[in-house]
Every structure is written in C-alpha cells, then in structure tokens.
Image: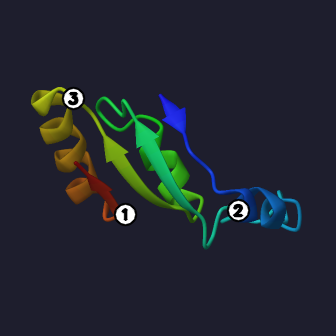
Amino acid sequence: MVLILHSHTLHSQSQRDPSSARPFEGLRLIDVGCGGGLLSEPLARMGATVTGIDAVEKNVKIARLHAVRSSLTYVYL
C-alpha cells in the first residue's frame, strides 16, 4: 500500500485538528495496492476522498462490495 500525497496536501495537513471526527476532510488520497479496502475505509470515514487501486480484480470486487455496504464515498479501480 502506498499513499500519494501532493505537497500542498502535506502542508495543509499541519493545520488540521487531529482530535476532529473527520481530520482528513477535504484530502484526496490514492491507496495503491488497496486489497479489500482495509485502509481505504477508515481513511474515508475520517473524511478523505479515497481512490483505491489494485491489480487483482477479485480484491477490487471485494472492496467495492464493502464500499456499498458502508455508505462511504471512495472509488476502486
């Protein structure tokens, strides 16, 4: 799993409240090698817009199923 953060995102991260229920609100993250979405889901619950990418189609299908069931906004490719 690799998180790719734009330098502007890293700078703005320092101004975020870590005690907030959604400290990643407004961030856009890419989860490369997302598997079944085990990291993508909590990041989305914390406010990030997450795009998960995995080379294994079965993993992407599982992650999409979790996304539908959790009512969170994230995309799997």
Q: Residue 55 has which mark?
A: 3
Q: Tell me residue 66's x, y (percent).
A: 25, 46
Q: Helix, strand, or loop for circle 1?
A: loop
> Of circles 1 and 2, which is in front?
2
In which image quadrant can residue 23 be found? bottom right
Residue of label 1: 72
Please tell me which residue lies in front, 17 or 50: 50
Residue of label 2: 9
Mark 2 to mark 3 CA distance (whole Å):
26 Å
Q: Which residue is drawn at 41% across and 34% down?
A: 38
| Amino acid on which the number 1 mark rests in the picture | Leu
Which coloring applies here?
rainbow
Q: How crowded is mark 3: few (under 14 residues within 10 Å), some or many (20 or more)?
A: few
Q: Helix, strand, or loop for circle 2?
A: helix
Q: Residue at x 52, y 32 (%)?
A: 2
| Amino acid on which the number 3 mark rests in the picture | Ala
Residue furthest bottom in the image: 26
Q: Tell me residue 44's x, y (percent).
A: 48, 57
- Of the numbered discs 3 and 1, the one sitting upstream in the chain is 3
| Amino acid on which the number 2 mark rests in the picture | Thr
Q: Tell me residue 57's x, y (percent).
A: 11, 32
Q: Tell me residue 56's x, y (percent).
A: 17, 26
